[in-house]
Image (cartoon, coloured by chain):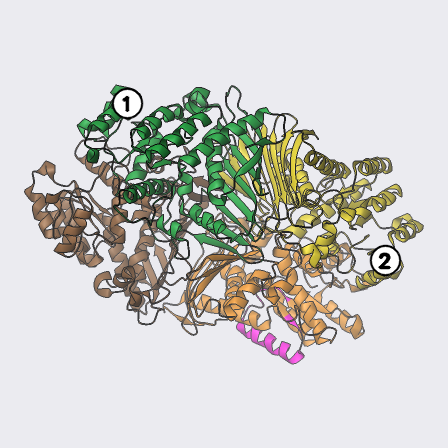
Chain colours: A yellow, B green, C brown, D orange
Amino acid sequence: MVGGGSGAFIGAVHRAAAVMDGQIEVAAGALSSTEEKSLASGRELGLPEGRVYGSWTRMLEGELALPEEDRVDFVSVVTPNHVHFPVAHAFVKAGFNVVLDKPMVHTTEQAEELVDAVEKAGVVFAVTYQYTGYPMVKQARHMVREGHLGEIRKVIVEYNQGWLARNVEETGAKQAEWRTDPGRSGIAGAIGDIGSHAENLAATITGLEISELCADLTSFVPGRRLDDDGNLLLRYEGGAKGVLIASQISAGEENDLRIRVYGSEGGLEWRQEEPNRLLFKPDGAPEQVLKRGNDYLCEDAKNATRVPPGHPEAFIEAFANVYSSVAATIRVARGEQPGDGMAHDFPTVHDGARGVRFIEKVVESHLSDEKWTDA
Amino acid sequence: MVGGGSGAFIGAVHRAAAVMDGQIEVAAGALSSTEEKSLASGRELGLPEGRVYGSWTRMLEGELALPEEDRVDFVSVVTPNHVHFPVAHAFVKAGFNVVLDKPMVHTTEQAEELVDAVEKAGVVFAVTYQYTGYPMVKQARHMVREGHLGEIRKVIVEYNQGWLARNVEETGAKQAEWRTDPGRSGIAGAIGDIGSHAENLAATITGLEISELCADLTSFVPGRRLDDDGNLLLRYEGGAKGVLIASQISAGEENDLRIRVYGSEGGLEWRQEEPNRLLFKPDGAPEQVLKRGNDYLCEDAKNATRVPPGHPEAFIEAFANVYSSVAATIRVARGEQPGDGMAHDFPTVHDGARGVRFIEKVVESHLSDEKWTDA
Amino acid sequence: MVGGGSGAFIGAVHRAAAVMDGQIEVAAGALSSTEEKSLASGRELGLPEGRVYGSWTRMLEGELALPEEDRVDFVSVVTPNHVHFPVAHAFVKAGFNVVLDKPMVHTTEQAEELVDAVEKAGVVFAVTYQYTGYPMVKQARHMVREGHLGEIRKVIVEYNQGWLARNVEETGAKQAEWRTDPGRSGIAGAIGDIGSHAENLAATITGLEISELCADLTSFVPGRRLDDDGNLLLRYEGGAKGVLIASQISAGEENDLRIRVYGSEGGLEWRQEEPNRLLFKPDGAPEQVLKRGNDYLCEDAKNATRVPPGHPEAFIEAFANVYSSVAATIRVARGEQPGDGMAHDFPTVHDGARGVRFIEKVVESHLSDEKWTDA
Amino acid sequence: MVGGGSGAFIGAVHRAAAVMDGQIEVAAGALSSTEEKSLASGRELGLPEGRVYGSWTRMLEGELALPEEDRVDFVSVVTPNHVHFPVAHAFVKAGFNVVLDKPMVHTTEQAEELVDAVEKAGVVFAVTYQYTGYPMVKQARHMVREGHLGEIRKVIVEYNQGWLARNVEETGAKQAEWRTDPGRSGIAGAIGDIGSHAENLAATITGLEISELCADLTSFVPGRRLDDDGNLLLRYEGGAKGVLIASQISAGEENDLRIRVYGSEGGLEWRQEEPNRLLFKPDGAPEQVLKRGNDYLCEDAKNATRVPPGHPEAFIEAFANVYSSVAATIRVARGEQPGDGMAHDFPTVHDGARGVRFIEKVVESHLSDEKWTDA
């Protein structure tokens, strides 16, 4: 693990997710940006002494120095955004499998370089758009693919948060500080942090590609340097239309990622805050509430769950599904298990690259007087 | 009553709403577009023989011929859209109070002429944007006005229907036929029929004025001549932003008018399909569910209700609130009661004119390559 | 109308409900317990001078003195409980159709006398258990009858209110005063006022008969003379089991009448506070949300509705369904319309009598040390 | 860990819960009822060779043979019910801390012996009533204790499941087999398996003690040897009343554990299937929706959570809270950390013993003709 040392919120979540299914343990780490903190964090986690590294470059060297079978099976990179590219790129080039936080990198150029590197190295590479790890998202994807909705006409995807409704970055909130800092967060605020999750969710479920978009971004809170609210009209290849909303100033909302998809034969609705339910609204028939864990769901949804219906699973379990799929994929690649189950069901480097491009195009549209910007 | 004869869905709703509170009875009518049907419908309703008219022009003459105290107290016009203007204009000019269905008229020119006529005649004039008759909409308006949300930053207003997801206008559905016919419905389909309700709801609650808008309209169903789906980005005077969605092809949705308003201090959420509840989401404190009929609500919300908390009121009651306010306003104008209670709490000719202009501007934006159209 | 004069809450609801569908108008009345108030209330309602009576006995005489075709078509009795029997009995014996508020009468003896009288007179007689007028209750009844749930095993019916959590009867709340007064309300408080609605709802939907019951009643509020909370175990003929809860001290609840029914093949759930939805939970398949107004519902549910799906109907509309069914039944009885549509779909004198017996048996069980009391 | 080997559903859940917070790892195990399976399961989990035991007696011997600092910190017992007592008792007597599945043991006699043993040994002993590990349950407990509801008057606690609506124990469902077998499950079916969770939830939140109860148990499914449905009236010390429902034949329900508590000043409602929300219904003020992870919650609720508001936590996280509290309590007992945070917030041997007594009393009441059985 690179990054995610003591006090880093997301590091603990990655670890809880990774170990949940008893397949993965943290074996080595360069857990912080300074040598001292890295070593302290590694010891706190109880890592074996020789595998606690003072920096990610040392870790790369150290692991490469080990016999191949003793090296880490994959590297999880959970650093702030601006350190994603160099770390991920170096490990990929050295032949390591990688799990990387989103947004993958800062520019399309970097993204394309990373795509090339991954393809050349032939490694397993996942981007933790963890919300698509929810089983009912997999069920939604299945139902669209199978034609239960008919031809898709409309997508409304939203990510409403309110935690940046006040200027919390100036009162010491660490999570708010780097997210509102262009140097660390990139060219976009809300759009990069959560709009990209919305984009990934819609793309995963519908398989549609955005052809044109029209964006209006705002920084509502005085002094804020990046957008904290964004509203988009979308046009998809093939004629479907969409609306994408991403906001961090929607006061009173917590983590309200939700999507509605409408086709010629019916609609679907899913909300991250009640993730165990998926609404299916067939035209002319009663609405259905599909629930996680049931036999009537598709295989992908059933594979991605642990406890029976009515025993809810949630955020950490969705996150764990990304890790478990990576683990399964590595085992399949090594011939340790056949290619079924959860293998190959995680967001890839291509999802990551598409997300980076999306952020760039949204900002381009925002700055343009043209109604439509090619995406 | 003009229009709304046998078989006209909305006529029966207007009558049920009008008589609900025991203040209004239907006294005269020209209930259909042909003399024969008008007379038959009037008799079926049990109207007094001399007050059943074969056409609205005869009704106007007939009522004017009566002594002033025997005339109808107001005229309710529930004809198809294209007949709104001549009827309403004539009755207003003759000094009658008028209740008119929405959208008020077809063009801003007509709207302005009607505004002038109403102001000159000094009559009571209401447009039945009945959704703003719901008590919890009045409560939402109150909370915004009183500053419970702080400065308003964002509005998301939606009206999702699915009943036109198929080409029902070609299979004999009368309601669908005229709504998808430019000759009777005007220049817009979904935007005129339901988008204007969404506009009115947002304007009523927030008091904000749209300064610019960007619209993308679609006719998804082959052969349809008007839009059946519209998505808008809104910019308000003062800097707030908005999204407006109106769709009649959102398969599986019924009459899903809903609004969310976010300010610097908290958010509000209301849905027409569960109209007795209003969610208030103060920043940093538990979400509140305000419920119709309770003492803790504002006076306007309490006046607009009939039965105790937990005994739900719904669509017809909201509609009745428009009529009851018109009745109260007429009584106040005549000095029959003091100016409190429900008087002057209905959508006016100005709401109607703003709605007509909104429809025109949305269509203008849709046809434009400019990102923003002045509204 | 007998009772329901100025200021009587339920009188105005009865009138709004009665006139809603344009089939009924209030033609005569003895609206209060004193001559003076009766006359004043009658005039306020605009009743014709000769049909405003000072007492119900005068009204009976006066209407009988009219030619048969000029008399009221039915009498609606909305007096306090203790006046139900003499008024209803007298009008029935005189051959009038009657609509009577619940609980029908105070004792099983009176109930049986009334059943006899109704049968002898051959009149139409309805008891306003208005909650069974909701269309989705009719749908639930249909689904049980048609076997969608398999064999019924379990019923959980509840009526939770909180408005008597404090001693409001001593601070001038008129509705609370008579309901907590044994002289006017009868031997039971919450069980009589709302428990009887719960009993009627369960019986209407399931058709099951209670064979034995076990009751625990409580008066929680100091000084209260009747129960304000009751909890019951039920055993039904044929082996099904049940729980019935009726409470007026469940602080924070409004009018939370709800029912769940479980059979060998699935379950149903309905809540009065969201009356347009009915949950159907088939074993092993996704939960379904059936919604009022849709084509997929049964005929009884479709007949009992006025506006399209998504335009909610509520309490007054459910109440109106009782009146509209009475009106249709009278028309059928007179040969004015064929026997279909809404005719004969209202709670009868037998429902009323069963409700009275239920109240007696609950009180008997409460006072007994025996576990089970025959019902 | 004793029990919970390959294929045992609950073993994997215990392990996922235990390791979630990075404080616990599985160090030794006797994971199955036969030596062969135990060894295979231990190897599969990657346990160190010397710590994989063929039986729990070998494990007890083996661990005792180690230097004290090398022994397991606690033993988690997840065997079928009938093996709970001997294993737990032996480890407690040997001075090991123990985590034991519920119901704790089969008889009050065993329960009392275990209570004595725990008190003598002075060990940490937890029973995994995991549902009380949910943060919003801790918040509910806090609000009752702090008097936010006033004096508690009424409790409605339910646990509705439908998975035993059919005779699945005869078609190979392992989970159903032992639960419906008196030899392994004890004297009660649904009451023991889930009714005891309901009892624990109500007791945890309200602190009330049941004084008398009246139970009606049923075996609905032909051939079933234990109750699959139970309904209870409860009387609490001090005058509060209650209803407890536990059913495994409520077809269509999944894991619907829920509770409502009403006091003189307001009510609370919580549902396990939407565990991140707690409804608070203060008398005369708007309903509040309290949500996990927020600053406005009590310390116990805030300690028992990992991710920010709106990122839902669920069943495994609640389970993990029991383990994390045990770990904290052991660290406190050893002087490794001060006595705050999560320490001492888990269900104890006394909760376990009360649960065993509850099951016995329910069965006693069921078999009795007396209305009330002392509890």
Residue denoted by label 1: B57
Residue B327 screen position, x and y as percent: 30, 41
Residue sitting at x 22%, y 51%: C4
Residue D284 screen position, x and y as percent: 41, 61
Amino acid at the residue labelled 2: Thr
Q: Which disc number belongs to residue A34?
A: 2
Looking at the rendered image, the disc whose residue lies closer to the viewer, 2 or 1, is 1
Visible in this render: residue C332? Answer: no
Residue A13 screen position, x and y as percent: 71, 54
Visible in this render: residue D18? Answer: yes
Amino acid at the residue labelled 1: Thr
In the rendered view, tell whether residue C314 sits above or below residue C309.
below
The chain carrying label 2 is A
Secondary structure beneath dot 2 equals loop
In front of the other: B362 or A291 = B362
In the rendered view, tell whether residue C230 sits above or below residue A285.
below
In front of the other: B329 or B260 = B329
Secondary structure beneath dot 1 equals helix
Q: Which residues are magenta?
A: D100-125
Q: Quadrant of the N terminus of chain D?
A: bottom right
Q: Residues within 10 Å of mark 1 (few under 14, many from 20)?
A: some
Q: Residues within 10 Å of mark 2 (few under 14, many from 20)?
A: few
In front of the other: D61 or A353 = A353
Q: Is residue B182 magenta?
A: no
Gap between marks 2 and 1 measured at Cα: 87 Å
- Residue B241 figure quarter: top right
Residue B203 is left or right of residue C330, and the answer is right
